[in-house]
Image (tube, grey):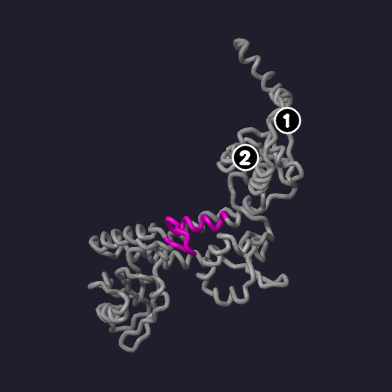
Amino acid sequence: AKAPASPAKAAASPAKAAETPAKAAEAPAEEKPADLKAATKKQVEYYLSDENLCRDEFFHKKISENVEGWLNLSFILGCKKIQALGIVKEAPIVEALKGSHLETKTDDDGTWIRRTEPLPELKKSAAGRHKQEKKKSTSHDGGVMMKVTAVPEGMQWMDIRDQMKEVVKDVCKSKTPVTFVSSITEQRECFLAMDMFDQDLQFFEAMELEVKGNKLETVICYGQDLIKGLAKLPRHVVKKRELKAKDRQKARQKPIVINGQKFQAVGALRGKMKEIIHNRSDGEEIPSESPDYGLVCAVLKYHPRAEVKMKDMKGLKVDKNEGGQSRCFWILRGEGAGEDISTKKCLDAIEANPPYAES
């Protein structure tokens, strides 16, 4: 037979059951400033918004696990931005959410919160896609690897190497601009490894290669092609590429200056753009005299179609994009006219050619 529970353990359950009434009997907390309540309400509503839940796997899973869609507030209390507001108990959150579209309740298991609308679909591949794009953008930091296909019969790898040297002579100052060329396979293709130079990836994306009157097809290697190409490189070439890649990646961490504001790296600028959007409500205009307005305008000028996009611009606002899936900046042209604009394209352009701060 099992031994009877100890008095301490036996008293545990009643104590837990009495936890909620005890909390209810506590003296009301000191009134918080209105701006703190607003900040709390805005942050919690964001956590349970479509915009966040379509990519927040943790919260999405926790809400899905509850049949009625409730989320325990203990998970919200564990968020850094809530902790930064000095909130350590559920009561201030419940108070801040009075009048919110979100629902709250308290029972023997704690305090809960839920949406009044169905959960959005979770885009599970979003994080993975971002990592893949980032990896793709740095794959050629040590020099571009290319594959040449449809090489005519009789053409030698030396012919391709010599012509490539001629093509890059004005942009690549290296003594060995072509660091490696593989032999031509039975499929009439070969791999080339190039030394690095500024804007090299963009240069080769636009390049057309003609050798002895023949236009050859060239593609920048990614995925399996990149793996095959790198496997052909001699060890000393691989080591040199790795060292140069580290140098280029280190250079990206240099401070940049945009509209007179200094950022430690492009990543910090990306964070600032997100902060500007997050701190504003849908449809809220950015005052033209504010530092944020000048910074956003300076970033938007890096857009590939900035001249067209920013023509007749009268102002800026934050709102959902035309598809209603995410929040972004809108260029205003007066009388309600305007269009959304991608800051990702702008920031990618800045990363490709950073405006480094003068040392």
Mark number for residue 107?
Answer: 1
Q: Find residue 2 and report its horizontal and vertical position in percent.
A: 60, 12
Residue type highlighted by circle 1:
Asp
Visible residue check, residue 121? yes
Residue 318 to residue 337: above or below: above
| Mark with earlier residue (2, 1) | 2
Are there few (<14), some (14-19), or many (20+) residues within 10 Å of tag 2? many
Which residue position holds label 2?
Answer: 76
Which residue lies at the image location 43% right of the left edge and 67% below the top edge? 352
Check if residue 127 falls in the magenta segment.
Answer: no
Q: Find residue 47 and report its horizontal and vertical position in percent.
A: 63, 47
Q: Are marks 2 and 1 in contact (CB under 8 Å)?
A: no
Check if residue 268 falls in the magenta segment.
Answer: yes
Are there few (<14), some (14-19), or many (20+) residues within 10 Å of tag 1? few
Which residue lies at the image location 75% right of the left edge and 41% below the top edge? 98
Q: In which quarter of the image is residue 172?
A: bottom left
**Magenta stretch in the rendered image:** 256-275
Residue toward you, 216 or 318: 318
